[in-house]
Each structure stands twice: as structure tokens, then as C-alpha cells.
Image: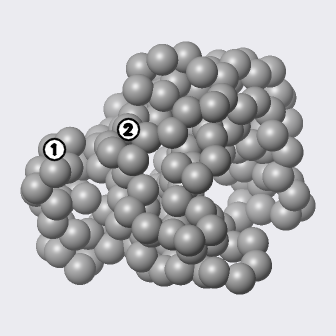
Amino acid sequence: MKNRLWTFDQESAGSLPAGLVPVLGTWVVQADPTAPTPPNILVQTAQFPWGLHFPRCLIEGVRAADLIAQVAFRPLAGENDQAGGLMFRVQDPDHYYVFRANLLDDLALFRSSEGTRRALGRFQARDEGWQWLRVEAWGARICCYWNDKLVIEAEDATFAEGGVGLWTIADSVSAFDDLGVEVP
């Protein structure tokens, strides 16, 4: 696998796209004329208002060490959180990196290990509309971009390679489009 792109436009509304594996939450294709590439988007619709839950969806058969991954994200609803992000170097449901945007908070790069998240970097920014999240990981170096602007740089070698996926938190209802992964 070198480059892959999921636009969700060939999928039927109400379906889960082939090749995506939900870890938690309800992930469905919906029509959205405002999508970066209409007509369809992927939406995580399940809400978990109590406790710390992380709805996730992994891309089947994708594992990488060095990569560029990007996705268009838009927060749709949530009382406690309105967040979405890109997971990468996923070892299992409890061990991964995630670069996320939260309309009610900020942008952050986290390392999740044994159910505990550790912030590796934060950037104060918020946007209600469609926004682009991109991660470039080369060895221990991780660069996170928001709308093509470098906002977080970190060095962390905890997870050298792993899977790729999408992430939300708690009661976030989040939309995604144009999920792309490039592996050198």
C-alpha cells in the first residue's frame, strides 16, 4: 500500500464503508452537500455523555511506520466535547497516537497508553466548519498540521509503527471526509 483515499462517495447512505472496522461507536455514511468532496461523508453518531469513551474506527489492512495521513473534519454536535481526530501507529484499542481538534477546547497530540492519555503538544485554535487535520510521522518525529499550518511538533518513539484510523470522544457527533494515507 502506497497511497489510499476514502471519499465515501461511492458508499450507500446508512452503510459502514468496506475496509473500516469500528472499535466503538456508530459509524455511518451520510449525504452532505457541504462536504469537501460531495455527496457523502462518514459520521460517528453514537453519544456517550457520561464517562471517558473514545469511539474509534480503524482502517483494515493499513499499518505503517512513516506516513502522512490527513482527513477533513467537522464537529456536528456534543454538550461535553465536539471533537474528532486521526489515530496513527495504533497498536491496539488502548495504545496509539491521536491528533485531534475539539471545538470546545483546542488542538492536541496525545499518546494513549494503558487507557491514559498524555498530551505531547497543544495549540489554541477552534473552527466550527470543515477543517483539515494532517499528521506526518517520520521515525520519532511527529508533525501535526491544521488547515495546512504546522501547529504541533513532537518527538516520541513509544510506538514505531501501527494502524491508522479515526477518533472521537464522549458525546461528540463528528463528520469526516477525504481520509487519505500515504506511506513512502
Left or right: residue 64 compared with residue 175: right
Residue type, numbered disc 2: Gln
In the image, what residue occupies the spot 51% across and 69% down? 78
Of callouts 2 and 1, which one flags the residue occurring earlier in the amino acid sequence?
Answer: 1
Would residue 76 be seen by someone viewing this image from the given angle?
A: yes
- Give the vertical position of 135 relative to 36 (above or below): above
Vertical order, 159 against 102 (above or below): above
Please tell me whether mark 2 sits on a helix, a strand or a loop.
Answer: strand
Please give the residue where the numbered disc 2 appears in the rendered image. Answer: 131
| Foreground disc of the pair 2, 1 | 2
x%, y% of residue 129?
A: 33, 45
Near mark 2 (Cα within 10 A), the count class, few <14, some 14-19 or many ≥20, is some
Around disc 1, counting alpha carbons within 10 Å, would you say few (fewer than 14), some (14 to 19), or many (20 or more)? some
Q: Position of residue 112 (x, y in %)?
A: 79, 52
Residue in the picture at 32% in, 73% down? 28
**SS type, badge 1:** loop
Q: Which residue is mark 1?
A: 37
What amino acid type should be assigned to the residue bearing mark 1? Thr
**Quadrant of the image containing the N terminus:** top left
Q: Quadrant of residue 179?
A: top left
Q: Where residue 81 is drawn, which disc sits there?
A: none
Residue 12 horizontal side relative to residue 145, left or right: left
Residue 57 or 116: which is nearer the viewer?
116
Asked if residue 56 shows in the view, the reply is no
Using residue 17 as the reference point, say whether residue 67 is left or right of it. right
Residue ID at (82%, 27%): 156
Do tag 2 and tag 1 residues touch (Cβ < 8 Å)?
no
Q: Please give the count of numbered marks on the rendered protein.
A: 2
Foreground pick, 66 / 128: 128
Residue 9 in picture, x, y percent from top left: 15, 56
Query: Residue at left 60%, top 21%?
Result: 151
